[in-house]
């Protein structure tokens, strides 16, 4: 009996450090992919593809967000929102949280690729509400993408407000004063 316990504890002690090291490596690879996402989405995607699936639910969910975002940025064909929907379900929409906001932003990008402007607008609005800091790069991207979705829906007043708030557009002098049309907006 004592010998069985000794073998059990020896195996347990050998397994725990291996799983901790594996978890730390996953976190480092996810962080590396996250940092590369804006500058080099192809490289970020290759890091994500080369990873083994993270073990913790939290890391798996963040992996899904980053993988979906990489698919959008690399213009891959997306056929469903089922993966990113699991991530937004996990993060929810009640607490301001960077990862929750990026998950909803990514959900909006997926809907954009699927051609569903109504759902994309809903997801981008959720993301906008969840960012704890409005100076984050993804907050500006959310406003920009929200503006382009409004423009697609011919909701020009809302589009102008969103696009102007990003600083990516400005009104051309002597444009029409009341009837706002994005044809009179010049990109900077």
Image: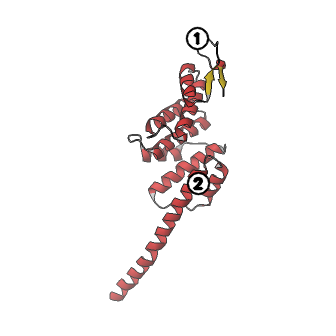
Where does label 2 land, which residue?
Answer: 33
Image position, residue 137 (x, y; %): 55, 40
Task: Work out whether residue 53 can be spotted.
Answer: no
Instruction: Name which residue lies at 58% across and 51% down.
Output: 35
* Direction from residue 43 to residue 111 in the image, left or right: left
User: Residue 36's spot in the image, x, y percent?
Assistant: 61, 51
| Secondary structure under the numbered disc 2 in the rendered image | helix
With respect to residue 12, does 143 lie above or below?
above
Q: Are marks 2 and 1 in contact (CB under 8 Å)?
A: no
Q: Which mark is residue 86?
A: none
Residue in view at x 50 percent, y 55 percent: 60
Residue lying furthest front: 173
The quadrant in which residue 172 appears is: top right
**Pointer 1 residue:** 177
Q: CA distance from mark 2 to mark 1?
A: 46 Å
Q: Earlier in the sequence, mark 2 or mark 1?
A: 2
Residue 141 in view (yes/no): yes
- Few, some or many residues within 10 Å of mark 1 (<14, 14–19, 20+): few
Where is residue 25? Give x, y as percent: 53, 64
């Amino acid at each position: 009996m004592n010998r069985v316990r000794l073998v059990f504890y020896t195996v347990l002690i050998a397994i725990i450090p291996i799983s901790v090291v594996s978890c730390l490596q996953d976190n480092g690879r996810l962080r590396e992919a996250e940092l590369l996402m804006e500058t080099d989405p192809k490289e970020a995607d290759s890091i994500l593809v080369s990873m083994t699936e993270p073990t913790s639910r939290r890391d798996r969910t963040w992996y899904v967000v980053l993988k979906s975002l990489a698919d959008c940025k690399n213009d891959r064909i997306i056929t469903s929102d089922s993966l990113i929907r699991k991530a937004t379900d996990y993060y929810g929409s009640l607490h301001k949280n960077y990862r929750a906001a990026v998950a909803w932003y990514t959900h909006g990008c997926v809907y954009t690729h699927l051609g569903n402007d109504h759902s994309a607008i809903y997801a981008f609005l959720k993301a906008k509400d969840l960012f704890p800091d409005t100076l984050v790069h993804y907050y500006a991207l959310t406003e920009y993408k929200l503006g382009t979705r409004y423009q697609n829906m011919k909701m020009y007043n809302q589009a102008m407000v969103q696009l102007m708030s990003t600083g990516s557009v400005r009104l051309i002098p002597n444009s029409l004063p009341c009837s706002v049309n994005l044809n009179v907006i010049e990109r900077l």
